[in-house]
């Protein structure tokens, strides 16, 4: 039986965080300390226990710190929820949240159990104000919590985000739930390739339906308001997970992703400095690893057509083939006809001979 032990600051289980050929993304990414390119200026210091700085366009990991360290993800796990469910739920679908969804603990947009909302409304509130109530309502609209969690974990495996285990759609702390800075960067990169995901995380404000009209909601990602080129993505915090964040910004046609986990204070300025370093380093340093591509879909198994069945034939060729037990009935009929014909000719000849005599 595998043993596991848990420290408050890190999920440390004795299960592998490696692919068959080593750590996902490269051998150097298996290290726990700061992993920086040789001959380049070191990345800015941060209080985060783990981080990744990556070029979203090329997939190159420019620098990292304990990138595969498994930590509680808090609401950054909602990036996986959104990435999994956006293709599965029609954004125009009208949803009536259950009382279970309405009463979710933690951050919420304030849903009521009435059919006021489209799926798109819930996706926006999920990413802007980190609505735990929206996460549960979307999971229920997708066919239920268990089905949604299975699909979230399958999506993580497809992305090769093997450090990630989803136990809730909201990121609320639960035993066994985990992610890593490397996985958050993978998920964010995949999400940014989806037009709706990118649109939702980039919104600064939006109107949200209410029983009487609507009210305005604002994005919790502070860098959207003050960092040049910020695209957005997601931040999170719980008392056990502490602060976590994954975000992306674009400048001069290039996109940099930064993810951090386990930060015990105000991290926005530190993330901005990590982004600045990423923009200055991209294309100039030797990468320390890479963000891997999703697992390719298996090619469909070719269908071999069945051999056509040969029916019995009454043609002369078929009649000539004899079964193992002896001549076929057709052969006997032909033989009988020959004998009958011969007998007829014999009788006819005898009669003529008698007349001639």
Image (tube, helix red, strand yellow):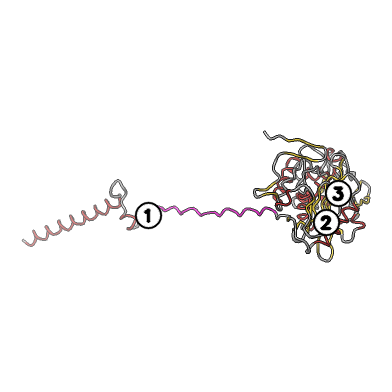
Q: Which residues are magenta?
A: 294-312
Residue 203: image x %, image y %? 88, 56
Of the numbered discs 3 and 1, the one sitting upstream in the chain is: 3
Residue bearing the label numbered 2: 42
- Residue reaching furthest to the left: 357
> Mark 3, residues whose alpha carbon is within 10 Å: few (<14), some, or many (≥20)?
many
At numbered mark 2, what does the secondary structure look like: helix, strand or loop? loop
Residue 330: image x %, image y %? 30, 52
Nearest the eye: 182 or 47: 47
Residue 14: image x %, image y %? 71, 39
Of the numbered discs 1 and 2, the one sitting upstream in the chain is: 2
Q: Which mark is residue 313?
A: 1
At numbered mark 3, what does the secondary structure look like: helix, strand or loop? strand
Q: Which mark is residue 235?
A: 3
**Residue at x-position 85% and y-position 47%:** 48
Asked whether 296 falls inside the magenta stretch, the response is yes
Q: Quadrant of residue 104?
A: top right
Residue 226: image x %, image y %? 92, 57
Q: Quadrant of residue 63?
A: bottom right
Quarter the N terminus occupies: top right
**Residue at x-position 92% and y-position 46%:** 211
Residue 194 in view here: no
Q: Nearer the viewer, mark 3 or mark 1?
A: 3
Asked whether 202 falls inside the magenta stretch, the response is no
Of the numbered discs 2 and 3, the one sitting upstream in the chain is: 2
Between the C-alphas of marks 2 and 3, the distance is 25 Å
> Mark 1, residues whose alpha carbon is within 10 Å: few (<14), some, or many (≥20)?
few
């Amino acid at each position: 039986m595998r043993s596991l032990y848990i420290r408050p600051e890190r999920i440390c289980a004795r299960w592998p965080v490696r692919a068959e050929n080593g750590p996902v993304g490269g051998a150097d990414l298996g290290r726990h300390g700061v992993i920086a390119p040789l001959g380049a200026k070191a990345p800015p210091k941060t209080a985060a226990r783990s981080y990744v700085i990556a070029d979203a366009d090329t997939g190159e990991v420019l620098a990292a710190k304990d990138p595969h360290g498994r930590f509680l993800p808090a609401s950054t796990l909602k990036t996986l929820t959104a990435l999994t469910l956006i293709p599965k739920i029609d954004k125009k679908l009208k949803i009536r949240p259950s009382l279970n969804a309405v009463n979710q603990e933690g951050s919420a947009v304030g849903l009521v159990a009435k059919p006021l909302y489209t799926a798109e409304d819930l996706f926006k509130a999920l990413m802007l104000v980190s609505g735990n109530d929206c996460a549960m309502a979307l999971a229920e609209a997708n066919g239920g919590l268990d089905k949604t969690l299975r699909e979230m974990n399958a999506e993580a495996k497809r992305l090769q985000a093997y450090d990630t285990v989803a136990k809730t759609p909201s990121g609320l702390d639960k035993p066994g739930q985990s992610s890593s800075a490397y996985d958050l960067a993978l998920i964010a990169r995949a999400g940014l390739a989806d037009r709706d995901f990118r649109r939702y995380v980039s919104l600064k404000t939006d109107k949200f339906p209410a029983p009487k009209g609507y009210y305005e909601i604002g994005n919790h990602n502070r860098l959207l308001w003050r960092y040049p080129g910020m695209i957005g993505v997601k931040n999170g915090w719980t008392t056990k997970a502490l602060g976590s964040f994954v975000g992306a910004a674009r400048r001069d046609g290039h996109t940099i992703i930064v993810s951090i986990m386990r930060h015990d204070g105000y991290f926005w300025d530190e993330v901005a400095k990590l982004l600045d370093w990423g923009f200055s380093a991209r294309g100039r340093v030797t990468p320390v690893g890479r963000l891997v591509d999703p697992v390719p879909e298996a090619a469909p198994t070719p269908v071999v057509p069945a051999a056509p069945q040969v029916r019995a034939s009454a043609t002369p060729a078929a009649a000539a083939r004899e079964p193992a037990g002896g001549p076929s009935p057709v052969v006997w009929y032909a033989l009988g006809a020959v004998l009958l014909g011969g007998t007829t000719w014999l009788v006819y000849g005898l009669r003529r001979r008698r007349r001639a005599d």
